[in-house]
Image: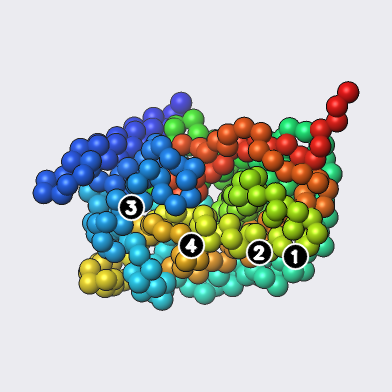
């Protein structure tokens, strides 16, 4: 283990320790059990599987007001009005709030330009996805065909492998490199959450190796930067969206029957999944110019975290266009996957408790989704 790796490990431990310290210890003149934003980003609170609130935590964040300063030295922005104010600004960029072993986000100044959004649209926008619709449908059908009736883990056996092969097709990865691409995606799975919540050193090292592998795979391409972002963050969004939609369907046989009779129902289900559980509950940003939001003055260089604290009114607006550009491909894949699974199996029902990963405060990533498909044969 190198000195640089040791130093990174110490930094990650210190950041996570600060999150725990401020989460637990009360603040002077502020009632409660500490800083609710620190509790959120440390990623260890119970109740993570509830879409509306993590054990009252999101309510505690919202109670502080639309814009307030966390003890972790970031502006916390909540509420629809403040989010609308931010969404009209071009002076924000996604930025890591904790140390990274290998950078994968485009430079903040680059995010400010229209070139990156243009490249993302050319690779994974609505028109590009429409051009790959047949290939995505074919991959979803193949993934469903590989499953048999009986017990299944819908994440490990369906959502994750389908996402890997579908994004390999979408990003024009040569077939002989599909395995390397899938390995890169697996390594970078915690990348989005690692922007706000320090991962363990071993996970961080695997994440860095995954980023390097994907960067090498895309080397020499005209739009390598956009391809890397779509692979790391876009594929993660697709797998999470599909997992959330399937989770929603486990206790809704009526909707499953509707899906089987009308594959177009998949689009309505995916939209509902997005509305009920936004893909990113928190989004770490940096201000590239001074701004005033809900009466608070944010200076250049200040860190800002947008936190979605409510549901039912539609997905929160994404203040950074590059993030919104990741959604068309993720949405299209989830719709194709639901339609393919519904066409193959008459029944879908739960077969155990779902498991969401700790240290995943942004995505609340599902890692296990036990279910039963079809009618299991009896002998």
Q: Are the residues at dot 1 and dot 4 in contact (C-beta closer than 8 Å)?
A: no
Q: Are the residues at dot 4 and dot 2 in contact (C-beta closer than 8 Å)?
A: no
State the residue position of label 2.
Answer: 268
Q: Are the residues at dot 1 and dot 2 in contact (C-beta closer than 8 Å)?
A: yes
State the residue position of label 4.
Answer: 312
Say which residue appears at 39% left-offset and 73% top-offset: 84
**Disc 3/disc 4 C-alpha distance (Å):** 15 Å
Q: Give the secondary structure at mark 4.
A: loop
User: Which numbered dot is residue 59?
Assistant: 3
Q: Is residue 291 left or right of residue 150?
A: left
Q: Nearer the viewer, residue 181 or 80?
A: 80
User: Which numbered dot is residue 46?
Assistant: none
State the residue position of label 1.
Answer: 264
**Disc 3/disc 1 C-alpha distance (Å):** 35 Å
Mark 3 or mark 2: name the one nearer the start of the chain.
3
Q: Nearer the viewer, residue 378 or 5?
A: 378
Q: Give the secondary structure at mark 1.
A: loop
């Amino acid at each position: 283990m190198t000195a640089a790796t040791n130093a990174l490990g110490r930094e990650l431990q210190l950041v996570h320790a600060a999150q725990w310290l401020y989460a637990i210890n009360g603040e002077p003149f502020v009632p409660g059990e500490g800083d609710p934003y620190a509790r959120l980003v440390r990623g260890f609170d119970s109740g993570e599987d509830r879409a509306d609130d993590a054990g009252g935590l999101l309510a505690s964040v919202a109670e502080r007001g639309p814009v307030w300063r966390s003890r972790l030295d970031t502006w916390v922005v909540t509420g629809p009005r403040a989010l609308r104010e931010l969404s009209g600004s071009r002076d924000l960029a996604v930025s890591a709030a904790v140390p990274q072993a290998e950078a994968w986000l485009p430079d903040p100044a680059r995010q400010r330009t229209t070139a990156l959004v243009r490249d993302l649209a050319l690779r994974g926008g609505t028109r590009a996805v429409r051009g790959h619709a047949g290939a995505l449908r074919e991959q979803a059908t193949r993934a469903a065909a590989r499953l048999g009736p009986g017990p299944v883990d819908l994440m490990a056996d369906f959502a994750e492998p389908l996402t890997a092969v579908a994004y390999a097709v979408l990003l024009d990865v040569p077939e002989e490199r599909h395995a390397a691409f899938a390995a890169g995606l697996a390594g970078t799975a915690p990348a989005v959450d690692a922007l706000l919540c320090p991962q363990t050193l071993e996970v961080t090292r695997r994440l860095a190796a995954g980023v390097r592998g994907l960067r090498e795979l895309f080397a020499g391409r005209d739009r390598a930067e956009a391809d890397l972002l779509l692979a790391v963050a876009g594929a993660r969004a697709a797998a999470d969206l599909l997992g959330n939609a399937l989770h929603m369907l486990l206790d809704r046989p009526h909707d499953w029957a509707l899906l089987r009779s009308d594959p177009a129902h998949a689009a309505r289900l995916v939209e509902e999944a997005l509305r009920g559980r936004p893909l990113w509950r928190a989004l770490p940003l940096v201000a590239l110019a001074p701004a005033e939001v809900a009466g608070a003055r944010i200076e250049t260089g200040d860190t800002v975290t947008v936190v979605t604290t409510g549901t039912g009114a539609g997905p929160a607006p994404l203040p950074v266009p590059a993030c919104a550009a990741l959604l068309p491909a993720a949405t299209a894949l989830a719709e194709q996957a639901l339609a393919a699974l519904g066409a193959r199996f008459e029944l879908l029902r739960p077969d155990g408790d779902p498991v969401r990963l700790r240290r995943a405060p942004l995505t609340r990533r599902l890692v296990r989704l036990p279910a039963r498909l079809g009618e299991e044969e009896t002998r």
